[in-house]
């Protein structure tokens, strides 16, 4: 999808463009910045990502630059982090050696574009989940990609609490997740016995506490860019916070993120083994199956709640949108997965009874 | 109990999208086809609305979980279950503390009208949800197994209606009877 105007405002796109050029010039120490092509990139429901080409006259970025400007979408829902905070997280993980687009400048001043934003370098490739899991051309590269993702995850977990530059990040442990899911279910008109059953299991199987690390909280296929077979950037840091080191592992492996390849348990791209191997080699920590299982249960619960929240926009918010409305139905897929994870004997029995 | 948004609501949204947004994009010679599709959708909607959705099997599971065989048979036949009344607030998720001693609610044994069955089912599922949250079945392996069987039956039934492909992709029979 392409567009040629920046977020609309009273002052109009031309003024916005001039204000943006001036901001970029000041931030980079350039004598002047000339903005060329601007296009709205596909895929942002909560955030808008604008492809932005500009010519810098001197300063830190002298020459022609391809960038992405990230800001809130007009119809966005509140997310965990604001854009300036997300920028700080991106800076921290970039410094830790995680493969992310290089963060360049953040702007909290609403006078420039009408809302806060940040600018990062534009990386090549695509993040679409389905081609990444299904394209035959990627077949030989997938195990290595899974191993690389394991290493990336271990690197991002070297960012640890407490940190003055990330003091705004909240810590969310297993009990906080469980309480939040229950609070949501209490407000929902439809009871969900399977989710309640799984929450009870989670409540009675909370693993030993490990020191909190940075969690991406949406680390999965569909949120990393591949240029051919090359990983070019891990995206969308808006849900980041402090948490358990196995939380992101459970999220990437949970069935909801396998995009048509349910058999490939590491994000629909590979077996778990190469992903775990990469993670263990980089982090020096062995993964325990019970801990990962716990976090996979939490991942499915979270997936279910997010799906229901999507259809709440229709059920409660009145949004007449078929795609949003129908997403709520996917919560039942999570419920089947929870039953399969927590009652494998029951699953086997019912599969055997198929006639 | 089915997922929300209800299928009839989704159908209404889909019909709206078809008539309001897609129809104007098509050449006039295909407008009749689109209207036919819209008519077919309307017929399905009317029939679905008129049909009393059968929830007897899952309700029977619940009846057996919560009380005697007698109660469940009585419920199926629309008679009196002879079950004790619930205490105030019991079985409501998020409303105070649940006693953990489940009873068959009077609602299940009431005469079975369409809306009533729907409301009864919702009450029953709310109660089951509350009991599962509080671990009410955990001291009895047989009741815990019965609760699990209900969850399986409910989930498989919902996916058979809503997403049989997902069920099949996970190794389950996407159609027909499933033994609990």
Image (cartoon, coloured by chain):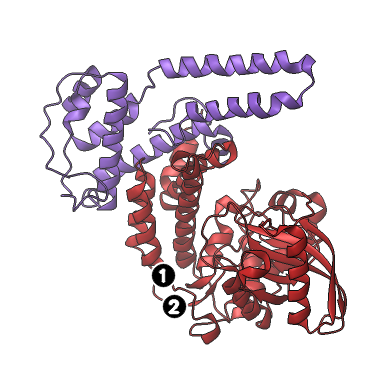
Chain colours: A red, B purple
Q: Circle 2 — which element?
A: loop
For mark 2, name the chain. Answer: A
From the viewer's perspective, tell me whether residue B163 is left or right of residue A225. left
From the viewer's perspective, tell me whether residue B97 is left or right of residue A169. left
Circles 1 and 2 on the same subunit: yes
Using the rendered image of the protein, determine whether residue A122 is visible from the camera's viewpoint.
Answer: no
For mark 1, name the chain. Answer: A
Quarter holding the C terminus of chain B is top left
Q: Dot 1, how many residues are within 10 Å of its Cα: few (below 14), some (14-19), or many (20+)?
A: some
From the viewer's perspective, tell me whether residue A347 is left or right of residue B39. left
Q: Dot 2, how many residues are within 10 Å of its Cα: few (below 14), some (14-19), or many (20+)?
A: few
Who's the residue at 45% across and 51% down the image?
Answer: A305
For the residues bearing labels 1 and 2, Cβ distance under 8 angstroms: no
Q: Circle 1 — which element?
A: loop
Who's the residue at 30% across and 42% down the image?
Answer: B147
Question: What label does residue A275 carry, if any?
Answer: none
* Relative vertical location of residue A97 with respect to residue A181 in this rendering, above or below: below
Q: Quadrant of residue B158?
A: top left
Q: Check disc 1 and report the residue beneath it.
A: A173
Viewer-side residue, A19 vs B21: A19
* Relative vertical location of residue A321 with respect to residue A21 in this rendering, above or below: above
Toward the front, the furthest residue is A11
* Relative vertical location of residue B108 with respect to residue A215 in this rendering, above or below: above
Question: What label does residue A210 carry, if any?
Answer: 2
Spot occupied by residue A306 in the image (x, y as percentages of width and height)? 49, 51
Spot occupied by residue A339 in the image (x, y as percentages of width and height)? 43, 47
């Amino acid at each position: 999808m392409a567009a040629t105007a920046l977020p609309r405002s009273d002052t109009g796109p031309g003024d916005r463009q001039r204000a943006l050029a001036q901001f970029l010039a000041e931030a980079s120490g350039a004598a002047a910045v000339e903005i060329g092509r601007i296009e709205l990139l596909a895929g942002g429901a909560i955030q808008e990502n604008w492809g932005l080409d500009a010519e810098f006259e001197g300063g830190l970025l002298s020459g022609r630059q391809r960038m992405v400007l990230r800001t809130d979408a007009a119809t966005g829902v509140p997310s965990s982090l604001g854009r300036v905070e997300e920028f700080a997280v991106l800076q921290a993980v970039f410094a830790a050696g995680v493969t992310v687009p290089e963060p360049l400048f953040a702007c909290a001043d609403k006078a420039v574009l009408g809302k806060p934003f940040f600018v990062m370098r534009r990386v090549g490739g695509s993040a679409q989940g389905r081609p990444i899991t299904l394209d035959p051309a990627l077949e030989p590269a997938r195990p290595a990609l899974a191993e690389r993702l394991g290493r990336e995850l271990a690197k991002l977990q070297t960012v640890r609490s407490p940190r003055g530059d990330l003091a705004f990040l909240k810590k969310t442990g297993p009990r906080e997740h469980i309480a939040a899911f229950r609070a949501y279910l209490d407000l929902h008109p439809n009871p969900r016995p399977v989710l309640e059953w799984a929450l009870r299991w989670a409540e009675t199987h909370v693993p030993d506490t490990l020191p909190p690390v940075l969690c991406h909280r949406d680390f999965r296929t569909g949120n990393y860019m591949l240029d051919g077979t090359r990983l070019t950037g891990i995206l969308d840091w808006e849900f980041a916070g402090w948490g358990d080191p196995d939380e992101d592992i459970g999220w990437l492996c949970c069935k909801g993120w396998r995009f048509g390849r349910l058999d490939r348990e590491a994000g629909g791209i590979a077996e778990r083994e190469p992903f775990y191997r990469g993670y263990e080699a980089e982090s020096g920590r062995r993964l325990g199956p019970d801990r990962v299982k716990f976090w996979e249960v939490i991942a499915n619960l979270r997936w279910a709640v997010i799906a229901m929240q999507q259809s709440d926009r229709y059920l409660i918010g009145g949004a007449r949108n078929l795609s949003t409305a129908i997403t709520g139905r996917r919560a039942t897929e999570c419920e089947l997965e929870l039953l399969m994870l927590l009652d494998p004997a029951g699953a086997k029995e019912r599969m055997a009874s198929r006639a | 109990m089915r997922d929300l948004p209800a299928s009839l609501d989704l159908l209404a949204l889909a019909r709206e999208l078809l008539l309001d947004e897609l129809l104007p994009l098509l050449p006039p010679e295909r407008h009749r086809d689109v209207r036919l599709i819209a008519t077919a959708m309307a017929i399905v909607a009317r029939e679905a609305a008129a049909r009393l959705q059968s929830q007897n099997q899952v309700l029977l599971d619940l009846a057996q979980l919560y009380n005697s065989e007698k109660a469940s048979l009585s419920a199926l036949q629309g008679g009196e279950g002879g079950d004790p009344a619930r205490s105030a607030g019991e079985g409501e998720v998020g409303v105070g503390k649940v006693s953990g001693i489940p009873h068959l609610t009077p609602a299940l044994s009431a005469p079975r009208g369409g809306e009533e069955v729907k409301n009864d089912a919702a009450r029953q599922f709310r109660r089951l949800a509350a009991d599962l949250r509080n671990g009410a079945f955990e001291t009895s392996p047989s009741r815990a197994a019965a609760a699990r069987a209900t969850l399986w039956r409910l989930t498989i039934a919902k996916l058979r209606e809503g997403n049989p492909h997902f069920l099949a992709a996970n190794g389950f029979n996407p159609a027909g009877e499933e033994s609990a």
